[in-house]
């Protein structure tokens, strides 16, 4: 007894066969090997971070054992409590947050205006300005320490948020300009002209059409400026010499030195390092979507 399939059933069976065939074609040995290699590389990359967090939950006695403890079973938050209750963590955290926010805001503002001028307008000295931006990036930061220290000292800005922020902004702005220039150049000026034909002014066309398209680029540039300000150590070491005005990298260095004077407590050191990394992780979780699209869309020739 033979059964006759309806056209809909026949089409469904055909689609299933095509899907199975495509699935078999997609699963290639080369892809499997590349996937395994990617997983291995990811595990190698993330292992130091895991080991830092794992060690921060274990007492120093366990960490000094010759046999490694791979999982923090029986661990506690005592190391974090000892670090936080030390009384110096939150002032350093506030100092770093204020400096990072000020640096990001002013870097984005200055770099955005400069990138817009370079990409949208033709003026005398435009090429020289672009060349100067590139040359500034080639200057070694260490060669400017003496001049920066004397300048901040003459302005009475040593051990201040404003003094460090000015130096950070000056160091980060050139590369941020170059980064944003690619984003601005990737947006056709014809979009603004079309909006102006429809009755919008130049400012309205820019704010309604161009500016929303630049949001991923601004986020990506902001992430770069934030990381530079958050992790910077050498300039802060020169400018911020008082214990009452220290950023988190300086605080972590002082914490390790204090710990070394009484035999290094690696559990507390790892807990302190984890606390320094937490704000960066939170910041990345907030902006990760925009940052990914910004890094991809910014890779244009402008």
Image (cartoon, rainbow, N blue to C red):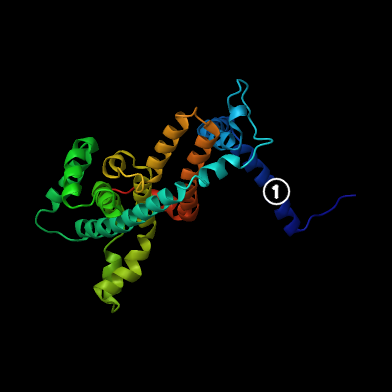
Give the residue drawn at x 90%, y 49%.
Answer: 1
Farthest top residue in view:
66
Residue 184 in the image, given as x and y percentages of width and height: 29, 57
Give the residue drawn at x 59%, y 28%.
Answer: 63
Is residue 69 depicted above or below 248 in this figure? above
Closest to the observer, 192 or 19: 192
Give the residue drawn at x 47%, y 54%.
Answer: 289
Is residue 154 depicted above or below 41 in this figure? below
Whether residue 101 sits left or right of residue 202 in the image: it is: right
Question: Can the viewer see residue 224 in this picture?
Answer: yes
Q: According to the image, label 1 marks what residue?
A: 16
Give the residue drawn at x 46%, y 47%.
Answer: 89
| Mark 1 secondary-structure assignment | helix
Q: Quadrant of residue 5?
A: bottom right
Question: Can the viewer see residue 298 in this picture?
Answer: no
Residue 158 in the image, given as x and y percentages of width and height: 24, 48
Instruction: Sort mark 1 into few (<14), some (14-19) or many (20+) by Cα contacts within 10 Å.
Output: few
């Amino acid at each position: 007894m033979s059964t006759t399939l309806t056209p809909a059933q026949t089409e469904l069976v055909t689609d299933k066969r095509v899907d199975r065939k495509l699935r078999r074609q997609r699963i290639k040995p080369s892809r499997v090997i590349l996937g395994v290699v990617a997983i291995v590389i990811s595990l190698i990359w993330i292992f130091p971070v895991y080991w830092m967090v794992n060690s921060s939950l274990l007492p120093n006695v366990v960490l000094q054992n010759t046999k490694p403890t791979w999982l923090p079973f029986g661990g506690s938050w005592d190391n974090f409590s000892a670090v936080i209750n030390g009384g110096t963590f939150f002032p350093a955290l506030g100092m770093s947050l204020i400096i990072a926010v000020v640096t990001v805001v002013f870097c984005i503002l200055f770099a955005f205006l400069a990138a817009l001028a370079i990409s949208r307008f033709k003026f005398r000295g435009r090429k020289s300005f672009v060349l100067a931006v590139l040359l500034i990036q080639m200057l070694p930061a260490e060669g400017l320490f003496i001049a920066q220290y004397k300048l901040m000292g003459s302005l009475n800005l040593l051990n201040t948020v404003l003094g460090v922020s000015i130096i950070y902004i000056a160091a980060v702005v050139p590369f941020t300009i170059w980064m944003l220039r690619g984003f601005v150049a990737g947006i056709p000026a014809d979009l603004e002209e079309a909006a102006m034909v429809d009755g919008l002014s130049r400012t309205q066309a820019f704010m309604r059409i161009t500016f929303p398209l630049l949001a991923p680029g601004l986020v990506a540039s902001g992430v770069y400026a934030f990381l530079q300000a958050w992790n910077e150590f050498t300039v802060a070491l020169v400018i911020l010499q008082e214990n009452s005005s220290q950023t988190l990298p300086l605080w972590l260095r002082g914490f390790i030195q204090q710990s070394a004077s009484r035999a290094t407590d690696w559990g507390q050191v790892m807990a302190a390092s984890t606390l320094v990394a937490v704000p960066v992780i939170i910041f990345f979780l907030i902006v990760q979507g925009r940052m990914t699209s910004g890094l991809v869309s910014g890779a244009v020739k402008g």
